[in-house]
Amino acid sequence: MQAFEDWNQKAKKTFNATSTEEVLTLTEAGSLLGLSKDQMKLYVDKHGLTKMPIKRSVHRYLLLKSEIDRIVG
């Protein structure tokens, strides 16, 4: 039986393999800040964080790890 891999994690792995910038999913970034995924979406819009769009998806995006690290730090 094949193990299930979350679509967001698969997109993140592909992006990280082809980019010099490391990214996080909304859920991962939210957990670092103590926010839910929905709260994190609002936080991103309110604070104008960089959204790394995922091809073929209008509503999905990844966040730059460097920006999240700066906020947490």
Image (cartoon, helix red, strand yellow):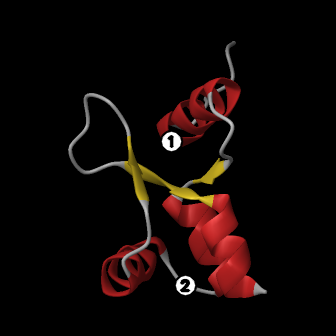
Furthest toward the front, the residue is: 20
The amino acid type, in three-letter code, at marker 2 is Leu
Q: Within 10 Å of the Cα at label 1, are there few (<14), some (14-19), or many (20+) other Cα atoms?
A: some
- Residue at 63% in and 87% down: 34
Comes first in the chain, label 2 or label 1? 1
Please provide percent x and percent y for residue 36: 50, 79
Residue identified by numbered label 2: 35
Nearer to me, 66 or 6: 66
- Residue at 64% in and 73% down: 68
**How far separated are the C-alphas under marks 2 and 1?**
18 Å
Please provide percent x and percent y for residue 29: 61, 69
Which structural element holds mark 2? loop
Q: Is residue 17 left or right of residue 45?
A: right
- Residue at 79% in and 86% down: 73
Furthest toward the right, the residue is: 73
Which structural element holds mark 1? helix
Please provide percent x and percent y for residue 35: 55, 84
Q: Within 10 Å of the Cα at label 2, are there few (<14), some (14-19), or many (20+) other Cα atoms?
A: some
